[in-house]
Amino acid sequence: MTSQTSKVAIVTGASRGIGAVIARQLASEGFAVAINYASSAAEASALVVELRQAGHRAIAIKADVANADDVRRLFEQTETQLGKVDVLVNNAGILKVLPLAQHSDELFEQTFAINTRGTFNTLREAATRLNTGGRIVNFSSSTVGLNLPGYAVYIASKAAVESLTQVFAKELRGRSITVNAVAPGPVATELFLHGKSEEQIQNFAKMPPLERLGQPEDIAGIVAFLVSPAAAWVNGQILRANGGLV
Ligand code: NAP
């Protein structure tokens, strides 16, 4: 066990995309960061090297959030190497755009396993392990408000995350832990860009009144706010961040 000198954050799915930028931002704000990933080991290690070279404390932990044993080990290894956890950011997620009628059983299971059960698994561990005064930030999506065709299963998996967020905030009464969710609109990461034509991407970019795609930094700034002392009174909320899209 290390002696704990800084606050500790776990960011799930932090090897790439929004999660990697959240890990960078939290590290730059003084958090020791556990960078969780499922398969992108090289990216996760490179991020650890980058953060350590900048003088921060960071480790990478491979764990499939859909697997309860993996998630238990994610917390145990974080506690052993960095200290007890103050912040959990449930960023890991997948999106497959396909009409409901074309979804296979396997794809339905996989989407709910990672997006919904993955969040459930980490929340259950956090219930007994998070420090008093801790912070939890879950990830929904603004598609929950848009009800776009092709997104039914993804939206359903994220709507469940919103419900988990609102109930869990109440179940943690007395612990001074806040539980909120961020619900981004389109953000320029592989998850959004993959499989879309340039025209489709431009159409999404023009949808919000701010007329651009979100960038991972837009979302990381909101997560940094929600885990900061300034957001101590924000609890059980779903914060849509999408340039005014919905
Ligand atoms: P991304 O670029 O595809 O990155 C996804 C991250 O999740 C990767 O680090 C990936 O790690 C990890 N991951 C996937 N399955 C995992 C598992 N089973 N266990 C642990 N980690 C896993 O996605 P993103 O755009 O950054 O999305 C981050 C979150 O924002 C997701 O919850 C997504 O639903 C939400 N969101 C995104 C957008 C958008 O437009 N981008 C909009 C709304 C909401 P590996 O590579 O190691 O598997």
Image (cartoon, helix red, strand yellow):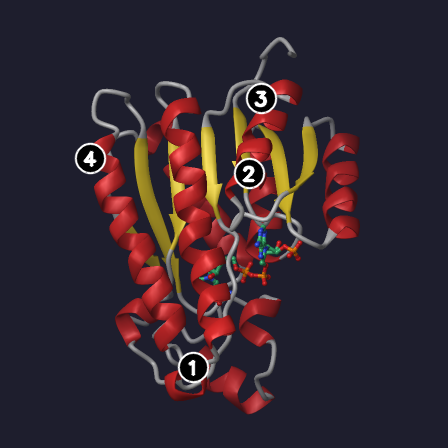
Q: Mark 3: is the Cβ under 8 angstroms from ligand 1?
A: no
Q: Which residue is mark 1?
A: 206
Q: Mark 1: is the Cβ under 8 angstroms from ligand 1?
A: no
Instruction: Judge whether 38 appears above or below 35 on screen.
Output: below
Say what amino acid the circle numbered 1 marks: Lys
Residue at the (37%, 63%) spot, across then down? 157
Q: CA distance from mark 3 to mark 1?
A: 44 Å
Say what amino acid the circle numbered 3 marks: Glu
Between marks 2 and 4 in the image, the one whose residue lies nearer the viewer:
2
Name the N-terminal-most of marks 3 and 2: 2
Name the N-terminal-most of marks 2 and 4: 2
Name the N-terminal-most of marks 3 and 4: 3
Q: Which residue is mark 3?
A: 79
Q: CA distance from mark 2 to mark 1?
A: 43 Å
Instruction: Judge whether 1 appears above or below 69 on screen.
Output: above
Q: CA distance from mark 3 to mark 4?
A: 25 Å
Q: CA distance from mark 3 to mark 2?
A: 15 Å
Instruction: Judge whether 4 appears above or below 222 on screen.
Output: above
Is residue 28 something that shows in the picture? no
Q: Secondary structure at mark 1?
A: helix
Image location (x, y in percent) of residue 25: 57, 40
